[in-house]
Image (cartoon, rainbow, N blue to C red):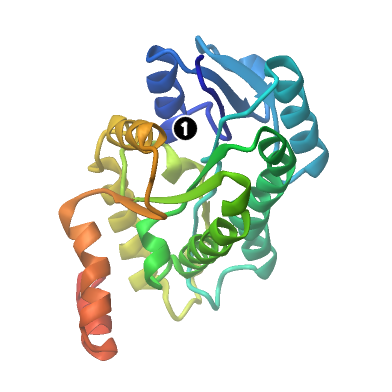
Amino acid sequence: MSKIVFITGASSGIGKSIALYLHDRGYVVYGTSRNPDKIDVPFSMVALDVTKEETIQKAIAEVAEKEGRIDVLINNAGKGITGPIEDTPTDEMRENFNTNFFGVIDVVKAVLPQMRDQKSGLIINTTSIAGYMGLPFRGIYSASKGALELVTEALSMEVKSFGIKVVNVAPGDFATNIASGRYHTPVYENSAYKEKYAENLALMDSHVDSGKDPIVMAEAIHKIIENKNPKIHYKVGAFMEKFSIVLKRVLPDKMYEKLLMNHYKL
Protein backbone atom coordinates (compact mmCIF):
# COMPACT_ATOMS: atom_id res chain seq x y z
CA MET A 1 0.00 0.00 0.00
CA SER A 2 1.39 3.39 -0.99
CA LYS A 3 2.25 5.72 1.87
CA ILE A 4 0.24 8.94 2.21
CA VAL A 5 2.59 11.91 2.45
CA PHE A 6 1.54 15.43 3.47
CA ILE A 7 4.06 18.20 2.66
CA THR A 8 3.69 21.84 3.63
CA GLY A 9 5.18 24.47 1.33
CA ALA A 10 5.23 22.22 -1.74
CA SER A 11 4.66 24.87 -4.40
CA SER A 12 8.34 25.64 -5.00
CA GLY A 13 11.92 25.03 -3.94
CA ILE A 14 12.86 22.13 -1.68
CA GLY A 15 9.23 21.25 -0.89
CA LYS A 16 8.29 20.91 -4.55
CA SER A 17 11.40 18.84 -5.28
CA ILE A 18 10.58 16.46 -2.42
CA ALA A 19 6.95 16.16 -3.52
CA LEU A 20 7.86 15.41 -7.14
CA TYR A 21 10.54 12.92 -6.14
CA LEU A 22 8.18 10.98 -3.85
CA HIS A 23 5.30 11.17 -6.34
CA ASP A 24 7.52 9.66 -9.04
CA ARG A 25 8.30 6.76 -6.70
CA GLY A 26 4.70 5.82 -6.07
CA TYR A 27 3.86 7.71 -2.90
CA VAL A 28 0.46 9.41 -2.64
CA VAL A 29 1.53 13.01 -2.16
CA TYR A 30 -0.50 15.95 -0.92
CA GLY A 31 1.31 19.25 -1.10
CA THR A 32 0.12 22.51 0.39
CA SER A 33 0.17 26.12 -0.67
CA ARG A 34 -1.73 29.23 0.25
CA ASN A 35 -2.95 29.37 -3.37
CA PRO A 36 -2.99 25.77 -4.65
CA ASP A 37 -5.13 26.57 -7.73
CA LYS A 38 -2.20 28.47 -9.22
CA ILE A 39 0.20 25.50 -8.93
CA ASP A 40 0.57 23.08 -11.85
CA VAL A 41 1.99 19.84 -10.47
CA PRO A 42 1.21 16.11 -10.95
CA PHE A 43 0.45 15.55 -7.25
CA SER A 44 -2.57 16.77 -5.26
CA MET A 45 -2.49 20.24 -3.72
CA VAL A 46 -4.57 21.54 -0.81
CA ALA A 47 -4.94 25.04 0.60
CA LEU A 48 -3.03 25.72 3.80
CA ASP A 49 -1.43 28.72 5.48
CA VAL A 50 0.71 27.66 8.44
CA THR A 51 -0.06 30.96 10.20
CA LYS A 52 -3.83 30.29 10.07
CA GLU A 53 -4.88 27.39 12.27
CA GLU A 54 -8.30 26.97 10.65
CA THR A 55 -6.69 26.24 7.27
CA ILE A 56 -4.40 23.67 8.88
CA GLN A 57 -7.26 21.81 10.53
CA LYS A 58 -9.28 21.83 7.32
CA ALA A 59 -6.42 20.55 5.15
CA ILE A 60 -5.46 17.72 7.52
CA ALA A 61 -9.10 16.67 7.92
CA GLU A 62 -9.61 16.70 4.15
CA VAL A 63 -6.69 14.36 3.47
CA ALA A 64 -7.42 12.08 6.44
CA GLU A 65 -11.05 11.70 5.37
CA LYS A 66 -10.14 11.01 1.74
CA GLU A 67 -7.27 8.57 2.38
CA GLY A 68 -8.10 7.21 5.82
CA ARG A 69 -4.57 7.84 7.07
CA ILE A 70 -1.55 10.15 6.93
CA ASP A 71 1.68 8.17 7.08
CA VAL A 72 4.25 10.95 6.71
CA LEU A 73 4.09 14.65 7.57
CA ILE A 74 6.89 16.79 6.15
CA ASN A 75 6.92 20.27 7.65
CA ASN A 76 8.80 22.13 4.95
CA ALA A 77 7.07 25.54 4.81
CA GLY A 78 9.35 28.25 6.12
CA LYS A 79 10.42 31.82 5.70
CA GLY A 80 13.79 33.55 5.74
CA ILE A 81 14.63 36.77 7.50
CA THR A 82 17.80 38.88 7.49
CA GLY A 83 18.97 41.97 9.27
CA PRO A 84 20.88 43.28 12.25
CA ILE A 85 18.98 42.48 15.46
CA GLU A 86 18.88 46.17 16.38
CA ASP A 87 17.45 47.26 13.03
CA THR A 88 14.96 44.43 12.41
CA PRO A 89 11.33 45.27 13.35
CA THR A 90 10.18 43.09 16.24
CA ASP A 91 6.86 42.45 14.48
CA GLU A 92 8.79 40.85 11.60
CA MET A 93 10.64 38.68 14.10
CA ARG A 94 7.33 37.50 15.53
CA GLU A 95 5.99 36.83 12.03
CA ASN A 96 9.03 34.70 11.26
CA PHE A 97 8.50 32.61 14.38
CA ASN A 98 4.80 32.28 13.51
CA THR A 99 5.82 30.62 10.24
CA ASN A 100 8.98 28.72 11.13
CA PHE A 101 8.09 27.63 14.66
CA PHE A 102 4.50 28.04 15.81
CA GLY A 103 3.11 27.19 12.37
CA VAL A 104 5.00 23.89 12.38
CA ILE A 105 3.73 23.11 15.88
CA ASP A 106 0.14 23.78 14.81
CA VAL A 107 0.47 21.39 11.85
CA VAL A 108 1.98 18.73 14.12
CA LYS A 109 -0.83 19.15 16.66
CA ALA A 110 -3.40 18.76 13.89
CA VAL A 111 -1.94 15.50 12.56
CA LEU A 112 -1.07 13.77 15.84
CA PRO A 113 -4.64 12.53 16.65
CA GLN A 114 -4.80 10.83 13.24
CA MET A 115 -1.39 9.21 13.70
CA ARG A 116 -2.26 8.08 17.23
CA ASP A 117 -5.45 6.45 15.94
CA GLN A 118 -3.53 4.54 13.27
CA LYS A 119 -0.73 3.77 15.79
CA SER A 120 1.95 4.86 13.36
CA GLY A 121 3.39 7.86 11.61
CA LEU A 122 6.52 9.77 10.73
CA ILE A 123 6.93 13.52 11.24
CA ILE A 124 9.86 15.21 9.49
CA ASN A 125 10.60 18.82 10.46
CA THR A 126 12.79 20.80 8.09
CA THR A 127 15.08 22.97 10.17
CA SER A 128 18.44 24.38 9.03
CA ILE A 129 22.15 24.04 9.63
CA ALA A 130 21.83 27.73 10.56
CA GLY A 131 19.77 26.55 13.54
CA TYR A 132 22.88 25.09 15.16
CA MET A 133 24.62 28.45 15.49
CA GLY A 134 23.80 32.13 15.80
CA LEU A 135 24.74 33.64 12.44
CA PRO A 136 25.28 37.39 12.10
CA PHE A 137 22.43 39.17 10.32
CA ARG A 138 20.47 35.90 10.36
CA GLY A 139 20.06 35.62 14.11
CA ILE A 140 16.26 35.44 14.11
CA TYR A 141 16.21 32.78 11.40
CA SER A 142 18.84 30.79 13.32
CA ALA A 143 16.77 31.15 16.50
CA SER A 144 13.51 29.98 14.90
CA LYS A 145 15.14 26.90 13.39
CA GLY A 146 17.16 26.16 16.53
CA ALA A 147 13.98 26.31 18.61
CA LEU A 148 12.32 23.84 16.25
CA GLU A 149 15.26 21.45 16.59
CA LEU A 150 14.83 21.36 20.38
CA VAL A 151 11.05 21.03 20.30
CA THR A 152 11.40 18.13 17.87
CA GLU A 153 13.70 16.36 20.33
CA ALA A 154 11.09 16.76 23.07
CA LEU A 155 8.22 15.70 20.79
CA SER A 156 10.09 12.56 19.74
CA MET A 157 10.10 11.34 23.34
CA GLU A 158 6.48 12.33 23.99
CA VAL A 159 4.96 10.44 21.05
CA LYS A 160 7.26 7.41 20.74
CA SER A 161 4.90 5.18 22.75
CA PHE A 162 2.15 5.83 20.15
CA GLY A 163 4.27 4.39 17.34
CA ILE A 164 5.07 7.86 15.96
CA LYS A 165 8.61 8.82 14.94
CA VAL A 166 9.85 12.41 14.77
CA VAL A 167 12.90 13.57 12.82
CA ASN A 168 14.77 16.81 12.18
CA VAL A 169 16.38 17.42 8.79
CA ALA A 170 18.69 20.43 8.66
CA PRO A 171 19.58 21.54 5.12
CA GLY A 172 22.42 23.87 4.26
CA ASP A 173 22.31 26.22 1.27
CA PHE A 174 20.30 24.97 -1.70
CA ALA A 175 19.70 26.64 -5.06
CA THR A 176 16.09 27.75 -4.53
CA ASN A 177 14.07 30.97 -4.56
CA ILE A 178 14.22 31.34 -0.76
CA ALA A 179 16.20 34.57 -1.02
CA SER A 180 13.39 36.27 -2.95
CA GLY A 181 10.87 35.24 -0.29
CA ARG A 182 12.90 36.41 2.70
CA TYR A 183 12.09 39.45 4.74
CA HIS A 184 15.11 41.66 4.26
CA THR A 185 15.52 44.42 6.80
CA PRO A 186 16.38 47.51 4.71
CA VAL A 187 19.94 48.76 4.69
CA TYR A 188 19.24 52.03 6.49
CA GLU A 189 21.43 55.00 5.63
CA ASN A 190 21.85 55.92 9.29
CA SER A 191 22.42 52.35 10.48
CA ALA A 192 25.53 51.51 12.48
CA TYR A 193 25.62 48.23 10.50
CA LYS A 194 25.09 49.72 7.03
CA GLU A 195 28.30 48.62 5.29
CA LYS A 196 28.74 45.21 6.92
CA TYR A 197 25.08 44.26 6.52
CA ALA A 198 25.04 45.29 2.84
CA GLU A 199 28.15 43.17 2.19
CA ASN A 200 26.62 40.18 3.97
CA LEU A 201 23.32 40.43 2.12
CA ALA A 202 25.21 39.92 -1.13
CA LEU A 203 27.19 37.07 0.45
CA MET A 204 24.04 35.30 1.66
CA ASP A 205 22.39 35.52 -1.75
CA SER A 206 25.51 34.16 -3.44
CA HIS A 207 25.52 31.17 -1.06
CA VAL A 208 21.96 30.33 -2.14
CA ASP A 209 22.74 30.80 -5.84
CA SER A 210 25.70 28.43 -5.59
CA GLY A 211 23.91 25.96 -3.31
CA LYS A 212 23.25 22.30 -3.95
CA ASP A 213 20.46 21.00 -6.18
CA PRO A 214 17.26 20.48 -4.11
CA ILE A 215 17.10 16.92 -5.44
CA VAL A 216 19.80 16.09 -2.86
CA MET A 217 17.36 17.00 -0.11
CA ALA A 218 14.61 14.96 -1.79
CA GLU A 219 16.86 11.90 -1.91
CA ALA A 220 17.71 12.31 1.77
CA ILE A 221 14.03 12.59 2.75
CA HIS A 222 13.20 9.47 0.73
CA LYS A 223 15.90 7.47 2.55
CA ILE A 224 14.56 8.64 5.91
CA ILE A 225 11.02 7.58 5.04
CA GLU A 226 12.25 4.15 3.96
CA ASN A 227 14.36 3.73 7.12
CA LYS A 228 12.48 1.70 9.73
CA ASN A 229 14.52 3.21 12.54
CA PRO A 230 15.49 6.78 11.55
CA LYS A 231 17.76 9.01 13.61
CA ILE A 232 16.44 12.17 15.27
CA HIS A 233 18.88 14.55 13.56
CA TYR A 234 20.03 14.69 9.94
CA LYS A 235 22.17 17.32 8.21
CA VAL A 236 22.07 17.69 4.43
CA GLY A 237 24.48 20.04 2.73
CA ALA A 238 28.05 20.75 1.75
CA PHE A 239 30.84 19.20 3.81
CA MET A 240 31.98 22.48 5.36
CA GLU A 241 28.41 23.39 6.33
CA LYS A 242 28.03 20.14 8.23
CA PHE A 243 31.58 20.32 9.59
CA SER A 244 30.82 23.76 11.06
CA ILE A 245 28.48 22.05 13.53
CA VAL A 246 31.25 19.69 14.60
CA LEU A 247 33.64 22.62 15.03
CA LYS A 248 31.18 24.39 17.31
CA ARG A 249 31.08 21.33 19.57
CA VAL A 250 34.85 21.01 19.90
CA LEU A 251 36.25 24.54 19.70
CA PRO A 252 36.27 27.11 22.51
CA ASP A 253 33.44 29.64 22.11
CA LYS A 254 35.70 32.60 21.33
CA MET A 255 37.68 30.66 18.73
CA TYR A 256 34.50 29.53 16.98
CA GLU A 257 33.12 33.07 17.08
CA LYS A 258 36.33 34.34 15.50
CA LEU A 259 36.00 31.80 12.67
CA LEU A 260 32.46 32.97 11.94
CA MET A 261 33.45 36.64 12.11
CA ASN A 262 36.29 36.06 9.69
CA HIS A 263 33.96 34.25 7.31
CA TYR A 264 31.45 37.11 7.40
CA LYS A 265 34.26 39.72 7.34
CA LEU A 266 33.19 41.34 10.62
- Asked whether residue 123 is in view, the answer is yes
Position of residue 84 relative to residue 45, above or below, is: below
Which residue sits at x=36%, y=37%? 227
- Residue at 31 percent across and 48 percent down: it is 173
Identify which residue, 31 or 153, lies in the foreground: 153
Report how many numbered discs are placed on residues in the image.
1
Q: Secondary structure at mark 1?
A: helix
Residue 120, given in percent of the width and then of the height, sits at 59, 37
Q: Nearer the viewer, residue 55 or 204?
A: 55
Residue 96: x %, y % from top left: 61, 57
- Residue at 38% from the left image edge and 46% from the top image edge: 230
Query: Compared with residue 266, is residue 46 higher up or lower down, i.e. above or below?
Result: above
Give whichever of 188, 154 is nearer the camera. 154
Q: Which residue is mark 1?
A: 15
Under mark 1, the amino acid is Gly
> Neighbour class for label 1 at 10 Å: few (<14), some, many (≥20)?
many
Q: Position of residue 191 (x, y in %)?
A: 49, 76
Q: Residue at x 47, y 17 (%)?
A: 27
Q: Quadrant of the C terminus?
A: bottom left
Query: From the viewer's perspective, is 74 left or right of 66?
Result: left
Q: Residue furthest right?
A: 54
- Which image quarter: residue 155? bottom right
